[in-house]
């Protein structure tokens, strides 16, 4: 039985509906709050949480329930009410299911997963208690050591939910890694994949043959010294650790799907009139013919696309950085993560973006120089890297080997070109010269990287270019 249960309803659960859900454990069940009142908890007799319930979220972006849950949601706008049960306590999981079933029944909707929310009856939890844990203040965290926080997830797509975002933030503040444990059938949202780059954070996949393995590298893992760590072969050496790779990770099935991946950074002068999100919107328009569909500070992305509202959120959080997720329409899969930071140079936007294409769809590669020019001339581009990779059209990250992308182009912004000594930026070791973007007096440069998609020659060209530009 799942630990997360979600009610999807066309009407907002009113206070009486929420109260009926909270009475799923009977009238004597203790109720507490955390997260400045944004999370309500049903607790055991000692006040430890059995079920934690997020405030209902209004989702105004089509396709998010289908993308993240594989569920059919009411027409937008609809309300997303999420409950998380304490791991390993059967009564807690039943309690979460009953809460969601009552919300869905009274507010008119459905619950995910359907099998977890079939009963409206009171769940008997007399005498049930939760093992004490220092992670109790973080509802998403299932185990905590002096090295990592561990989260167990049982969802089709592990998304950057408000729960998970809070857990990432809390772990970082405590100097800990975050390890997410899933079943072999789960996938990651790109938003989560991009946040798992720092060791000892990792995606831990349960596996019948090898026990556990890293879903992003395939390395076989074991629980040792307070965290999941790689297993070394008996004949390993410091120079050659020979980490075993899980057999399941190597089971590659070719689908013909591809992704066009673009990462870029813009640096804007700090100005009260600044509106963020314009660079990302320009890229989306050039490559798809339409603007992004929605955005949010977590998944599901719940707000209709609005650069002005996005800017207001980032301004309210300054000088702290703001992390955002941006999604496209269901018929053209696209997802971006954006980090807005205030630095000495100005206001920086770091964007990682991907679009998915099926076997019969061609990525618009001929539009890339135009995309680069728009960013360089209108949006204070600092740099951009474009890759094409064999990966799923729906952008979900499977626990399987997908192979590296092939770099297609690199772009250096006008200010970076101007600061490069001598003629270094224009004279490169590549076979093709860079293309000038913008005015001659202050150009940006577009470097084509004509690598063969069937091998890694594009990366060799890219590494040669980077060494040259750095003066190495």
Image (cartoon, rainbow, N blue to C red):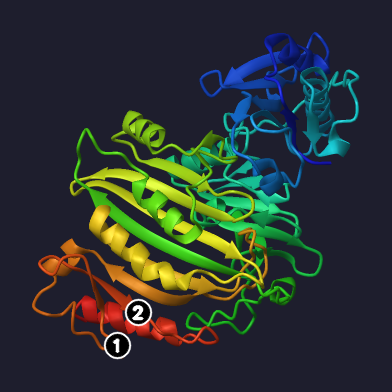
Q: Secondary structure at mark 1?
A: loop
Q: Where 194 sits versus 300, above or below?
A: below
Q: Where 50 sits versus 287, above or below?
A: above
Q: Quadrant of residue 429?
A: bottom left
Q: Earlier in the sequence, mark 1 or mark 2?
A: 1
Write down the residue under mark 2.
Answer: 448
Q: State the image coordinates of residue 216 (x, y, percent, origin top left).
A: 60, 65
Q: State the image coordinates of residue 457 (x, y, percent, origin top left).
A: 44, 87
At x 77%, y 14%, the residue is 29
Q: Quadrant of residue 102?
A: top right
Mark 2: few/some/many CA within 10 Å (<14, 14-19, 20+): many
At x 48%, y 52%, the residue is 336
The answer to whether mark 1 and mark 2 are in CB contact below 8 A is yes
At x 42%, y 40%, the residue is 173
The answer to which of 291 and 334 lies nearer the viewer is 291
At x 56%, y 22%, the residue is 38
Write down the residue under mark 1.
Answer: 430
Res 245 visible: yes
Mark 1: few/some/many CA within 10 Å (<14, 14-19, 20+): some
Screen quadrant of the C terminus: bottom left
The answer to which of 444 and 267 lies nearer the viewer is 444
The answer to which of 237 and 80 lies nearer the viewer is 80
């Amino acid at each position: 039985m799942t630990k997360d249960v979600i009610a999807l309803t066309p009407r907002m659960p009113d206070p009486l509906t929420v109260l009926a859900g909270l009475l799923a454990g009977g009238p004597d069940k203790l109720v507490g709050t955390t997260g400045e009142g944004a999370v309500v908890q049903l607790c055991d007799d000692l006040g430890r949480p059995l079920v934690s319930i997020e405030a209902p979220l209004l989702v105004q972006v089509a396709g998010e329930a289908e993308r993240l849950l594989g569920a059919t949601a009411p027409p937008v706008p609809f309300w997303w009410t999420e409950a998380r049960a304490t791991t390993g306590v059967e009564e807690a999981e039943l309690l979460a299911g009953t809460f969601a079933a009552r919300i869905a029944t009274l507010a008119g909707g459905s619950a995910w997963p359907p099998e977890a929310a079939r009963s409206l009856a009171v769940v008997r939890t007399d005498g049930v208690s939760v093992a004490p844990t220092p992670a109790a203040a973080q509802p998403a965290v299932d185990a905590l050591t002096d090295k990592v926080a561990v989260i167990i997830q049982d969802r089709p797509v592990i998304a950057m939910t408000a729960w998970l975002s809070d857990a990432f933030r809390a772990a970082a503040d405590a100097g800990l890694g975050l390890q997410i444990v899933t079943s072999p059938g789960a996938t990651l949202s790109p938003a989560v994949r991009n946040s798992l780059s720092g060791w000892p954070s990792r995606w831990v996949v349960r596996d019948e043959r090898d026990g556990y393995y890293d879903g992003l590298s395939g390395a076989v893992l074991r629980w040792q010294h307070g965290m999941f760590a790689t297993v070394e072969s008996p004949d390993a050496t410091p120079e050659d650790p020979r980490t075993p790779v899980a057999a399941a990770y190597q089971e590659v099935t070719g689908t013909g799907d591809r992704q066009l991946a673009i990462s870029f950074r813009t640096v804007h002068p700090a100005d009260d009139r600044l509106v963020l999100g314009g660079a990302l919107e320009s890229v989306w328009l050039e490559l798809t013919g339409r603007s992004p569909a929605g955005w949010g500070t977590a998944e599901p992305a719940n707000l209709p696309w609005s650069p002005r509202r996005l800017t207001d959120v980032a301004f309210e959080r300054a000088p702290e950085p703001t992390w955002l997720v941006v999604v496209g329409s269901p018929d053209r899969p696209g997802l971006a993560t954006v980090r807005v930071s205030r630095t000495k140079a100005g206001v920086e936007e770091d964007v990682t973006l991907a679009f998915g294409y099926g076997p019969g769809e061609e990525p618009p590669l001929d539009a890339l120089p135009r995309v680069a020019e728009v960013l360089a001339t209108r949006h204070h581009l600092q740099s951009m890297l474009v890759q094409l990779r064999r990966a799923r059209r729906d952008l979900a990250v499977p626990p399987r080997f997908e192979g590296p992308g092939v770099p297609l182009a690199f772009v250096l912004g006008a200010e970076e070109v101007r600061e490069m000594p001598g003629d270094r930026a224009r004279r490169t070791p590549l076979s093709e010269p860079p293309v000038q973007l913008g005015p001659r007096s202050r150009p940006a440069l577009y470097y084509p990287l004509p690598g063969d998609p069937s091998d890694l020659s594009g990366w060799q060209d890219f590494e040669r270019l980077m060494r040259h530009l750095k003066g190495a």
